Image (cartoon, grey):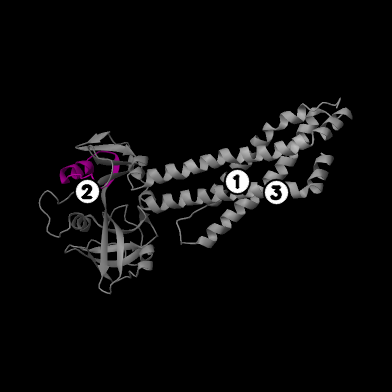
Amino acid sequence: MFIALRELRAAWGRFAMIGLVVALVAALVGMVSGFTIGLGNDTVSALRAMNAKSVAFADGATDFNRSTISAADVQEWHHVPDVDATPFGISMAHGETGSGAVADLAVIGVDPTGPLTPSAKDGERLGTAPGEIVVSTKLLDDGIAIGDEITVDNTDVVLRVVGTVDPTSYGHVPAAYTSLETWRTVRYGSTDLNERQRGTAAAIAVLGGDPPTTVGSTTVSPETTMLEAAPGYSGERLTMNSILAFLYVIAPLIVAAFFAVWILQRQGVYALQRALGVSRWSLIGATLAQATVVVGLSTIIGSAVAYGLGLLLGDAVPFDLPFTSLATTTLAVIAASLVGSAVTLRWVVTADPLT
């Protein structure tokens, strides 16, 4: 161990180069993790805020655009015993205020007196008056303010902003909450609905209880199905997680390559130590100690850089790296890198004292 620590000081340049590469890999892993979480939140934060255990779509549908639950089935859900369920709807809309501000909205229709209605941060809580909406604070950056009236494109639907809520979004579009009655006018593009359109919903959120598999013409699916119904959510997660997987494979290979060169250059030193009576286990311990010091410090530095860059980015991009996720990625990179360094130990234990 004494020699191992002396080598770290004597060959600090080589170890600094190894550490720099490991730190860059750790920073990249941290950044990709932050983007993965941030993109996921920007896609489904409005759905997660519902805290639904499961969701029911119309038979044959797995997303909110294709799913239309009839008024009769909505009423049938109200009579399912020992189950806390409530209808809701989601539609994309583009609107413009009288002052010329334009914005895309993810209009979410809920029961204003029900559990899906969010608390207001500013202004009023969502009421039952026709046309009322409360908007995500993200829409304030688009020039939307409390009191504005938003005209939905190419329709006679007018939405009046009465308050703001937490910065939730759906499909990378800021959320706007309104009553189910107003949501139907947004979905069908008219305030004059026919008999078939009245009382409908896009889905049923199951908040508690043990619902049956089917109710009327609806089928119950787990919460993950509801999240996957958000546009782009599954594809983004697959892409970002694939990048992370490759990074976790690359990290041990890089560390193994560096330490393999270092160990092969020191075969004579290991042979001399073996001739002087140093055990193989002592050599293994000293080598792993060197790797742990270099990899551990470098990974911590790289993770700190990723966290700092995330703070600098702010709200410019969807980036979110909580401390628990940062700690997880840090430990994962350290573990993967130490696995890579352990691969090179066979050259340590095979050093021949006769040389």
Residue sitting nearer the eye, 211 or 174: 174
Q: In this view, does 355 lie to the left or right of 67?
A: right
| Distance of label 3 from label 1 (alpha carbons) | 19 Å
Which region shows up in magenta?
A: 65-86
Q: Mark 2 points at which residue?
A: 201
Q: Give the quadrant of the C terminus.
A: top right
Amino acid type indicated by mark 3: Met
Magenta span has 82?
Answer: yes
In this rendering, is residue 321 above or below 260? below
Residue at 31 percent of width and 37 percent of height: 221
Label annotation for residue 298: none
Q: Which amino acid does label 2 sit on?
A: Ala
Q: Is residue 256 magenta?
A: no
Q: Is residue 267 above or below residue 38?
A: above
* Amino acid carrying mark 1 in the image: Thr
Report the residue at 56% width, 40% height from top: 248
- Sequence-wise, the earlier of marks 2 and 1 is 2
Q: Can residue 299 be seen in this view?
A: no
The earlier-in-sequence mark between 3 and 1 is 3
Number of other residues with Cα within 10 Å of mark 1, as a class: few under 14, some 14 to 19, many 20 or more: many
Element at label 3: helix
The residue wearing badge 1 is 330
* Dot placed on the residue nearer the N-terminal end, 2 or 3: 3
Q: Mark 3 points at which residue?
A: 17
